[in-house]
């Protein structure tokens, strides 16, 4: 049983990598099998609904990872500004570490599939709802007003999402730096009004 | 001759629509022919390099349109803040008008193809370089310092790009509102330091 669930986990991880590299449509099930070193027959054993199910589970792993990351960084931050800075920095590091080869897991599902799959539409929406809600909650815990926290959370998720596209195209970290400085400036302005 | 070039223009327009709706890989040449009401044989007549060439020309149309839009909005704006506000507003309107059905022309080329096509990589890079440079130039014309203008330009392009993903997934304009307010706040802070 343990081995079976290991195989499934490995396949979801491989699907996620492939989606981040070249999107959803170009992900072939044979690539997932190959990259995860899984037996061929395991695809329909673990994913009876095929590719859509695989992508939905990859999105779920991404969502949990992001919620955990935000919560962890918030625990180490002293202010909303500190959380914004650390969160953007983490995304920037990931982009540079992949040599501009890997983006977000969710964006390709939105741009390539969108409303055409109810399941992937729901998984994408759930991902962004939870990322925004978790950031907004943590900004409030760190002292922000509710409305400010919500603006900052939406702007942070959109800013990082956009920088993952433009930075990759430009092969430069400059978009991440600009997004970070803009968001940090906004968080500082909110704090100055509060104090 | 006029008719031939009309056909080509119509085909590039159709390719661009399809890319904005469901990305690059799911765009079939037969869909382009159908949507542009073109004769079947016209694909390889107008696009001897096929789909890659079609997408590169769609990216070029997008780039020229964005540069013209930024220049036009800058001509009507009284400050960097005014330009940011108008530019985000325009993207927000486009998203709502398409009922969250159409995103950016460039993002799918970056996420689905990336470095795998030299031609599409160059077209994507050129698009973001020109959008950022045009915004930065117009911010300076409207009174911003050079470094501030460059940060604001990168943050604006990334913020709008990201909001086009998250707003579409959430089926809500809230990401555009948050990005607009954050960028406007940053532009105002830059102006306050200058004055």
Image: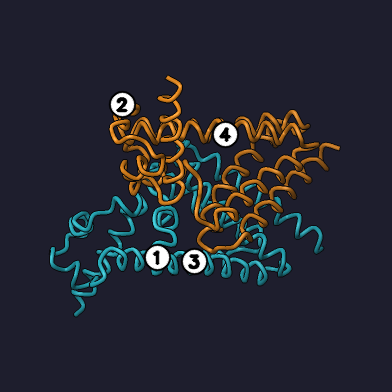
Chain colours: A orange, B cyan
Q: Please tell me which residue lies in front, A39 or A97.
A: A39
Residue linked to disc 3: B125
Q: Which comes before the other along the chain, label 3 or label 1?
A: 1
Q: Position of residue B89 (x, y in %)?
A: 53, 51
Would you name the residue on which mark 4 appears? A65
Between the C-alphas of marks 3 and 1, the distance is: 8 Å
Marking on residue B120: 1
Disc 4 versus disc 1: nearer the observer: 4
Q: Is residue A159 left or right of residue B194?
A: left
Crowding near the residue tagged with mark 2, few <14, some 14–19, many ≥20 C-alpha atoms within 10 Å: few
Q: Secondary structure at mark 3?
A: helix
Disc 3 residue crowd, few under 14, some 14–19, many 20+, Cα 10 Å = some
The residue marked by circle 3 belongs to what chain? B
Most foreground residue, A149 or B121: B121
Host chain of mark 2: A
Find the distance from the CA under tag 4 to the CA under tag 2.
Answer: 25 Å
Specify the label residue A45 is tagged with.
Answer: 2
Above or below — where is B110 with respect to A157?
A: below
Q: Residue at x 32, y 32 (%)?
A: A43
CA neighbours of label 4 inside 10 A, class few (<14), some (14 to 19), many (20+): few
């Amino acid at each position: 049983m343990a081995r079976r669930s290991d195989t499934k986990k490995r396949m979801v991880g491989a699907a996620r990598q492939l989606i981040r590299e070249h999107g959803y449509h170009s992900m072939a099930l044979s690539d997932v099998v190959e990259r995860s070193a899984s037996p061929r027959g395991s695809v329909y054993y673990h994913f009876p609904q095929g590719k859509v199910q695989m992508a939905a589970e990859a999105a779920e792993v991404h969502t949990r990872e992001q919620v955990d990351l935000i919560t962890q960084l918030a625990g180490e931050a002293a202010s909303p500004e500190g959380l914004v800075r650390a969160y953007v920095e983490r995304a920037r590091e990931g982009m540079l570490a992949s040599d501009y080869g890997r983006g977000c897991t969710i964006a390709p599902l939105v741009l390539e599939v969108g409303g055409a799959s109810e399941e992937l539409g729901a998984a994408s929406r759930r991902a962004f709802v939870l990322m925004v809600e978790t950031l907004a909650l943590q900004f409030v815990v760190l002292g922000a007003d509710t409305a400010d926290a919500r603006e900052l959370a939406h702007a942070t998720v959109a800013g990082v999402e956009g920088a993952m596209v433009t930075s990759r195209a430009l092969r430069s970290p400059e978009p991440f730096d600009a997004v970070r400085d803009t968001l940090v400036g906004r968080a500082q302005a909110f704090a100055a009004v509060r104090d």
